[in-house]
Amino acid sequence: MKPLKNVFVTLSNPAVNSIVLLRQKMIQSTPVLPRLGFSLLNDAQFEDYAMFVKSQLTINASSFPDLTPDMSTLSIDLNNFQVAAVSARTGAKTAIATRNDARVKLECTLTYMANSCSEIANGDVTLFELSGFEVRSKPTPSGILPAPSNFELTLGPVEGTLGAKFKRVKNSRVYEIYFGQWNTDPDTWTDHIMTTGSRSAIITDLSSNQRYSARCRAIGAKAIPGEWSAVSTMKTY
């Protein structure tokens, strides 16, 4: 199987397969759990938050060596969001969609970076707070979202691609679609995409004339993974 090159949301940290697995790790074992709460912030507040974290990490760079992702990635994602947010003020649907995608991308980058800062701090709350991220107590996972219904793979727009359709899950933020060879165990699949909706969910860079299977789950505001959908299978052309 070819590696994914273009996904609906490109995650900044290639060493971690999923933002959801990362948040699970943070909840279960991270010594200092970052308080993120992106869903409570409007675009202006979210921009201020990202800029503050960037400034603090720049000032205290010596305290956080080898951040993953690095500061250049944060700068690029923040700039892209700022530009997209300005364009979205026109009210154009395409501009708003671009702004939304840029925000999800920046949220992912900040989440990975918060976890990296926590690992570097290794339980030292005072050190961790130099990053600009806040600390919160570990939450008790609750409110598991149901599985997306009517999940179905479809032929993609070009050779070596597949589309994915499903019904929206209430209170979801993003969706994860994991896929692999049709005759393999779903629990072994590592290739995946993340998307904010079903209309633009396209899996790319697949082998031609090959049968694949996939399943989908919704992610809520607390980044807790929901239930898996039924597995769907489709052959590329």
Image (cartoon, helix red, strand yellow):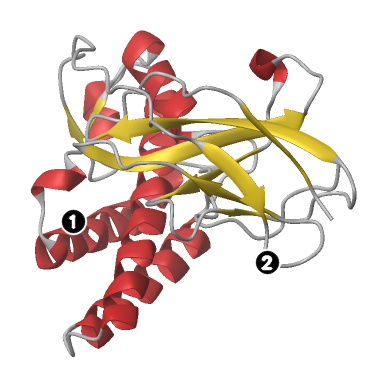
Q: Residue at x 72, y 51 (%)?
A: 4
Q: Is residue 15 left or right of residue 75?
A: right
Between residue 189 and residue 214, name the one nearer to us. Answer: 214
Residue hosting label 2: 157
Q: Residue at x 66, y 18 (%)?
A: 186
Residue 105: assigned label: none
Q: Above or below — where is 176 with respect to 197?
A: above
Under mark 1, the amino acid is: Tyr
User: Where does the N terminus fall, quadrant-wise?
Assistant: top right
Indicate the position of residue 217 as horizontal and vertical percent values.
43, 29
Q: Above or below — where is 160 with respect to 35?
A: below
Tell me if mark 2 has few (under 14), some (14-19) or many (20+) residues whose alpha carbon lies within 10 angstroms of its own. Answer: few
Residue hosting label 1: 49
Mark 2 to mark 1 CA distance (whole Å): 38 Å
Between residue 15 and residue 201, name the one nearer to us. Answer: 201
Indicate the position of residue 25 as horizontal and vertical percent values.
43, 17
